Image (spheres, rainbow, N blue to C red):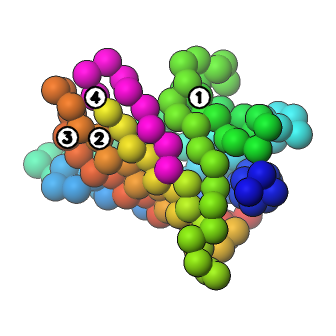
Amino acid sequence: MKNITKSVFLSLKGKWGFTREIRNKAYAYGVATFTEWSDDILLYSEEGKLHLTEQPQKLTFQREYIYCLLKGIIKVYFAAEGKKENLFHTVNFEPIDNASIEAIGYCQCKDDFYKVTYNFSSFDEFSIINKVTGKTKDYLSITHFERIA
């Protein structure tokens, strides 16, 4: 399934609008951009507004990741100011039916466990679901992306 993963990786380039629900805690919206650094490296950057369910004010946020295509898999790294930091997760995409492509990645970060699921209904629309459990965290985050450029 090396070619599917490469096709997904190449389709990420561009600008995406997103909405994010952090179940029972917050919701957010904003813009994410995958910028090509080389044939096999993309910088993901997002910025947006966060609404905490128990507070009336909106908070501005931004974050970065670096996506690297290596031997048919995608490795996602935390990033700060465009510099690669620790590995977040690794994914390999598989078709799950005639209309969807999915990948699941896992990460153990200190006492917390992350399960990250990518689901592409098309190359212009996808979702990322983060299920986080552990001593310090317990939440479900669902982010939906739609291509805008």
Q: The residue tagged with tag 1: helix, strand or loop?
A: strand
Is residue 147 shown left or right of residue 53? right
Specify which label sits upstream in the sequence, 2 or 3: 2
Give the residue pinned by disc 1: 77
Q: Is residue 13 magenta?
A: no
Q: The residue tagged with tag 4: helix, strand or loop?
A: strand
The type of residue carrying mark 2 is Val
Q: The residue tagged with tag 2: helix, strand or loop?
A: strand
The type of residue carrying mark 3 is Asp
Asked if the residues shown at circle 3 and circle 4 are in contact, with their CB atoms under 8 angstroms apart, the answer is no
The type of residue carrying mark 4 is Asp
Q: Position of residue 75 (x, y in %)?
A: 64, 35
Main secondary structure type of the part rendered in magenta: strand
Q: CA distance from mark 2 to mark 1?
A: 17 Å
Q: In the rendered structure, which segment of residues is drawn in magenta?
A: 104-112
Label 1 crowd bin: few (<14), some (14–19), many (20+), radius 10 Å: many
Label 2 crowd bin: few (<14), some (14–19), many (20+), radius 10 Å: some
Give the residue pinned by disc 3: 138
Give the residue pinned by disc 4: 112
Specify which label sits upstream in the sequence, 2 or 1: 1
Asked if the residues shown at circle 2 and circle 3 are in contact, with their CB atoms under 8 angstroms apart, the answer is yes
Asked if the residues shown at circle 2 and circle 4 are in contact, with their CB atoms under 8 angstroms apart, the answer is yes
* The image quarter in which residue 17 lies: bottom right
Label 4 crowd bin: few (<14), some (14–19), many (20+), radius 10 Å: some
Is residue 85 shown left or right of residue 40? left
In the rendering, which numbered label is found on residue 132?
2
Q: Position of residue 124 (x, y in %)?
A: 67, 70
Specify which label sits upstream in the sequence, 4 or 1: 1
